[in-house]
Image (cartoon, rainbow, N blue to C red):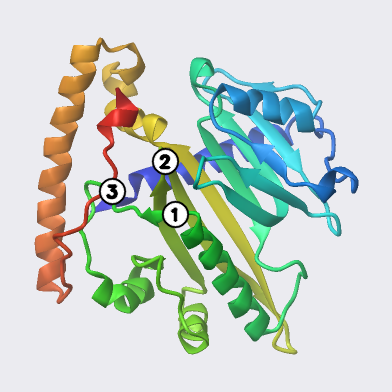
Amino acid sequence: MMERFKHYFNSILVFIFGFLLLGCQPNAKNTENSAMNQQPYLLHFGLQGFKDFAQYNQSAVDNHPVASFRELDFSPPNLGQIKIENGASSLAIDHVFYVLGTSFHKEDGIEVMTVNAGLNKEEFVRPEQADQAYANLMKRVNQAGWKLYIAPYNPRIAKEDNMRYVMKWGYSIDPSYIFSYEEWQNIMNASGSGSLGYRLYANGLLLNIYISQTKKTEDEKEQYMVRYTFNTIRYDQRDALSDSENNINAYTMTPLELKQAFEKEERRTQRSREYDEKEAIAEGYRIDESYVGPDLWQYVK
């Protein structure tokens, strides 16, 4: 059961590790220049990503043995607007505080990008304003063609059980469905929750969106933060195939070794999914056997 969240927590750990390392360095050049904010910052993955960060931020790259980090910082009231370039699935993100680009393999350029942003332009808003901002965000995500991503080892819970799944796990399994105001309030007011997440994919990228209510004032105004974590499928899958304890590195395998390792991992994740789906059925969940995710191998090889 624990492995289903492996990649999610890896992404969070990457962010925390990078943030702590950067915090020990001199502050990067602040990118709140209002003239530049008139146009969104265009950010790519891959080698072009290095050039993008260098264009917008002239501070030195933060290099470490396991990775290199690049960052952009924006300060209120001049929050940033960025656009993650991904072909037809490019995504504009408003009210940005911070962007961290991470490269684990220099030859692959930027592989992970974490973005912290506000849900609204204002720090505190009425519940209705937060709900409308959430709806607008998900409409943009859907229009850009981002689809539900169910990791190969996770159960394919049917969309009919979406609300039940959200209330238990905090993640929606139907990004095309925009929750009503009443449903949004139920999710945000749920005991121990106050958050809503999505796992998505498009054109070789994986995306976790995590919307969280961070504060509520006595006059019933609310504060929300949104974290976007993008991973290339290539990095995500090759990382899953690697094992530092056993000195296995997917990036140094021959093409045949990589194919064999990928097929072995497929068999393992299939067994894991079958086991978890049996558990889910026993708990009363329905399974969507028609779900088809992305062709992962095309990005791994």
> In front: 214, or 224?
224
Residue at horizontal 72%, vertical 79%? 125
Q: Residue 1 vs residue 65: left or right?
A: left
In the image, what residue occupies the spot 50% across and 15% down?
A: 107
Residue corresponding to mark 3: 151
Instruction: Tell me the residue that label 2 is attached to.
Output: 203
Residue with the mark numbered 1: 145
Percent position of residue 183, x then y:
45, 84
Type of amino acid at the residue the image marks with label 3: Ala
Image coordinates of residue 283 in percent, x first then y, are: 15, 74
Residue 56 percent coordinates (x, y): 78, 33
Q: Are marks 3 and 1 in contact (CB under 8 Å)?
A: no
Q: Give the residue type at disc 1.
A: Gly
Q: State which tag comes first along the sequence, 3 or 1.
A: 1
What separation in Å lies between label 1 and label 2 (alpha carbons)? 9 Å
Mark 2 or 3, closer to the camera: 2
**Residue 194, relative to residue 189: is it above or below?**
above
Total number of numbered labels?
Answer: 3
If the image is split into quadrants, where does the C terminus sit? top left
Mark 1 in CB contact with mark 2 (< 8 angstroms): yes
